[in-house]
Structure formats: C-alpha cells, structure tokens
Amino acid sequence: MKKLWNIMVVDDEEVMRESLAAWLREDGYTVDTAESGKDAIEKSKQKEYAIYFIDLKMPGGYDGIETMMEIRKILPDASIIIVTAYATVDTAITAMKEGAQEYIVKPCNPEEISLLVNRLIKIKNLQRENRILRKKLTKQYSFCDIISKNAKMMEIFSLVKEVASLRSTVLIQGESGTGKELIARAIHYSGDRATKPFVGVSCASLTESLLESELFGHEKGSFTGATGQKKGKFEIADGGTLFLDEIGDISPKLQMNLLRVLQERNFYRVGGTEQISVDVRVIAATNKDLGKAVREGTFRDDLFYRLNVINIHLPPLRERKEDIPLLVHHFIERISPELGKDVSDISEGALKILLNYNWPGNVRELENAVERAIVTSKSKMLIEEDFNFLGNGNTQGQKRWEIPEHMTLDEIENLAITTTLQRTHGNIKEAASILGVDRSTLYDRIKKYNLPRG
C-alpha cells in the first residue's frame, strides 16, 4: 500500500533534503525531492504526491507557506508538513491556519517521521476505501440516474423494466420534486424506443393556445405571429416518447384534443387540413389527484382512463429517508466539481439535520439545499452550520401552525409565498420546489400579489 502514495521533500539544503528522503525510502515509500518551492510546484503539475515535507525558510522565490498554498491549488487533498529550524508560536499558527497538517522542528527524528507518515497514510487509505465503497453503493442503488435503496422504489424500477418496451400510456403521479421526469426518461431509455426522440412539454407553463400549437404545430397564417409552418411536439417525437408534465393543468378543450390523438393516433396542425399520423408513446405526469379531479368534473374521465393504463406513484422523500445519505453523497460528488469547490463529504451532525427535515420539496429541494451548502461552505466537509437556512432541521415535531383569524385564502397564499421567498433569498426554483408548484405558477402569483423577489 505504501507504493500507492508518493512523497516529496522540499528543502534548499541538500543534506537535509537527501537524508529525510533516504529515511522515507527505507520505510518503503516512493520519494522525490525538490530544492526550491518553484521546483516543487512544477513537479506537482506532472505527478501526484500524497504527502509533502516543505522547509519553511527557503531563499528566493517561494518560501514554505507560499509553496504550500500553490501546491494546494494543484493537489487540494495533499497532506503538507512544514519543517523549520526556527520554531515559534506565530509561524506554527500561520502554517496550520493556511492548511498544514503538521509542523515539525529540525533536526528531525527518523522515528517521529515514520510514525507521522504512517498515521497520515492510514487516514488516506481509509478515505480512499470510503470513496470506493461509496461509489459501489451508488452504483448498486442506481437505475438510469435514479438513486434509491427504498423497497417501494425498487418495485418501481422493476415495473419500469417490464413496461419499457410496451406502447401503453403511463401516468406517473407524485409530489413536486419526486423525480417524475427521471422515471419517464428511464422508461424511454430502457425500451426499444431508446434511439428515438424523448420530447418533454410542461403543460402548466403555457396558455391554452400556445400549448395547443406546441403540441400539434401550426400552419402559416393560422394566428397572429404564425409566419411559417411549425411542427408540434407530437410530430417531433414520432417513433419515440412524448412526456406531458403537469397534465392535470390542461384545459377541457386540450383534454378533448389529446383524447382524440390517443384514440386515433392522428391529428391536425392548428389551422391545417392535412391529417398527420404518428407513432408516439405518451407518458404523462402530475402532482395532482386526477381521480379526485375526475370526480369533481375538472378532468375528463375517458382521458384519465386512457392515460392511466400503467400507473406509477412515486413516494415522497419523507417516506424514503434511507435514500437521503446516498443522494447527498451523490450530489456532493456531482455538484462540487461543477462549482469548482473542494467539498467531498458531510459530517454526521449535518446529515442528521437532513434526515430530520421533512423535505416538502422532495429530492429537488434536497439537491438545492446541498448545492447551497456547498456554495457557502468554508471547508472540505459540509457541517451543521452550512444548513442553517433549513431552520433547526426538524419539521416533524414542530407545533402545528395555526391560521390567523380573519385571513382570506389570498392573504394566506400571499403570506406563504412571501415567507418562502424570504427563506430562499429570492431563489424562484427553490421556492417553487418547496411550495410544490411549477415556476410559472409561482411567477404568476408573485405578479398577482406584487411581491418582492427576496
């Protein structure tokens, strides 16, 4: 295992440099040397070193602290030991503050050096094993970019595989942020339509006329602004899958049009006379109770039965909390490099906060929370303070909120949106996720109540 970890000794004094390197080589380590900070930095660009011994005082160019700071930019996980013949409290504090793991005084004791390196290597081996195990766990519990070890989710994964190559329509139900589109994509890419288009449409973000044009296309001159012929999503998705998100929000007229397409597999563009036939599998999703909407008369029962051939109901995150650690580590590994942040882990205390939180915005809210914590984090590990924006982290045992007397429904909605926007510092995506609505719906409410964003 010693061969896995390279060590570098940086010292302008040849005797000190070579004697320290010789001691380490006798212990079985691969050791390189550098006579200056500049030399060490250049060599670090060519080869990865796990541990550095760096002399504090080096004439010309970079001193020990400056060398350490430059090396950290190249190899942030390297362990750095500052070596000096002039030990003072101030220099020790400075070295440790800037990120040195240890601070030792010349002349060095070979036995002390061996024990120190052995301890650092043990830590690195454990960290490496943890990373490998975490990746194995993520792979074991990952299906088409969906990560879970929850029993209900495992049943859904099995169902997805069974129905992937069927033509039958699928209705995916679940709260906002549970991953309905991910399941839709998993169905598409697990079946025989995988090489064909996957086309998604948010039915809540467009007006009736715009959504009709978006789905079925239009002919030139069919309405003001129609300067040319346009293909709709049904045509674009021919041979593949059309994903209709927020299907519960479409108007009665579009419900009738959609029913006809599902029954006959053909349609007309807006303003057109040519009948267009397509081979499209429809997957619909909603966070609404369509059964209740049918009973209330706001959603056609015949369309509901057409869509509900295969039903998938995604559990909210609060019902699959065993997935939170897996998801958190997955988000850290993916988001940290995207943000250019050196965050690689989360403390037990911080993870406990996330496990105790109720996650009204589900997996999407969790992802947003981890990203926000990474942005503001000051260390390699996310800690409790990084999640202060979640409050005390426990929404399960809190006192039930009482609605103030004489408040109208509009006033309650206004208060809920205002409070959430303040909590998320005006982040519309995060606020919409917490409130369980589409972003376009939240924008409409902000405009309706003339609310500030933050």
Image (tube, rainbow, N blue to C red):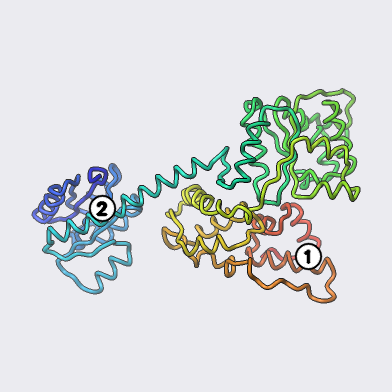
Where is residue 141 drawn, in percent x and y? Answer: 52, 43
Where is residue 387 drawn, in percent x and y? Answer: 54, 64
Which quadrant of the view contains residue 450?
bottom right
Q: Which residue in the protein does label 1 denote?
A: 413
Where is residue 372 drawn, in percent x and y? Answer: 55, 59
- Horizontally, is 138 left or right of 446 in the view? left
Q: Which residue in the protein does label 2 denote?
A: 51
- Horizontally, is 281 left or right of 266 in the view? left
**Which residue is found at the position 39% from the left and 49% from the top?**
130
Residue at the bottom extreme, as displayed: 405
Under tag 1, what secondary structure? helix
- Classify 189 as above or below 110: above
> Disc count in the image?
2
Q: How far apart in space, not on screen, are marks 2 and 1 (Cα)?
A: 57 Å
Which quadrant of the view contains residue 106?
bottom left
Which quadrant of the view contains residue 113?
bottom left
Going from N to C along the chain, the mark reached first, 2 or 1, is 2
Work out whether residue 198 or residue 130 is closer to the camera in this orientation and state it. 130
Where is residue 228 drawn, in percent x and y? Answer: 81, 30
